[in-house]
Image (tube, helix red, strand yellow):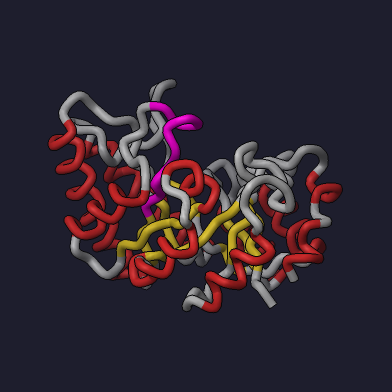
Amino acid sequence: MTPLSANLGFLWNDRPLPDAIRAAKAAGFDAVECHWPYAHDADAVKAALEETGLAMLGINTVKGPRESDFGLAAQPGREAEARRAIDEAFDYGTRVGASAVHVMAGLAGPDEMASMASFVTNLGHACDWAHDTGMKVLIEPLNPYDNPGYFLIGFDKAREVVDAVGRDELKIMFDCYHLQITDGDLLRRFRDNRAVVGHVQFAGVPDRGEPDHGEVAYDRLLPAIADAGYSGAFGAEYRPSGRTDATLKWMTAFR
């Protein structure tokens, strides 16, 4: 059976996070993950996870204080802010028992080499946290249509970052939605890079809606990825077209 994780950044996001965790359990998900949980009391989140028996697979570092921010780690000159965001994420993640922290790169600056150097340095700091806590560090290549100007676009660039950092704690978030748009050939790309993939997410392409429509046959792709060596849960990170509970019919076929 394909294990499924509910991304609570999109699913049941009209509820407090502890209640969203309970809703994910009731719907039959095997784990949860989220974007920015920091407004919610960590003890209450941990209690909901313990009550339901669900694991928190990952959380993101904060976007940053500026309206234009979408991450800080590849922003030259803002290393102190980026490290505070990393510290905050690992502290919160440790308190709720999260498995990984997604370190958000942020927008690209005018100097590509400076942005890369800043990202690599900040990821090294995150990897030190991961080494001490037993967690993972994730980076996620996005697509330029949803995220214009983002530093980390496309799988090859993410692989370049992983190789530059050179730490086992750092892995790539293999988001099938983003990577179908930027790269395609998802199964072959996964097979060729299995060692550096830390988590897999999915959503319908091209609208990021429910995963049972669009150009990717996830009911076949996800089992094939599992057959290729992936043993983790698959993160459902789609934008529901209505109330979340009314959009879950796809789960039957995926099971």
The N terminus appears in which quarter of the rendering? bottom right
Tell which of 174 and 53 is nearer to you: 174
The answer to whether residue 148 is above or below residue 162 is: above
Residue displayed at 31% across by 36% down: 151
Residue 154 appears left or right of 36: left
Q: In which quarter of the view is residue 169 placed? A: bottom left
Q: What predominant SS class does the magenta segment belong to?
A: loop
Residue 146 appears left or right of 16: left
Residue 179 appears left or right of 163: right
Give residue 88's position: percent from left, percent from top. 39, 48
Give residue 28's position: percent from left, percent from top. 77, 67
In the image, the segment drawn in magenta is 139-148
Give residue 139's position: percent from left, percent from top. 37, 52
Residue 131 appears left or right of 143: left
Residue displayed at 82% across by 41% down: 243
Tell which of 150 and 19 is nearer to you: 150
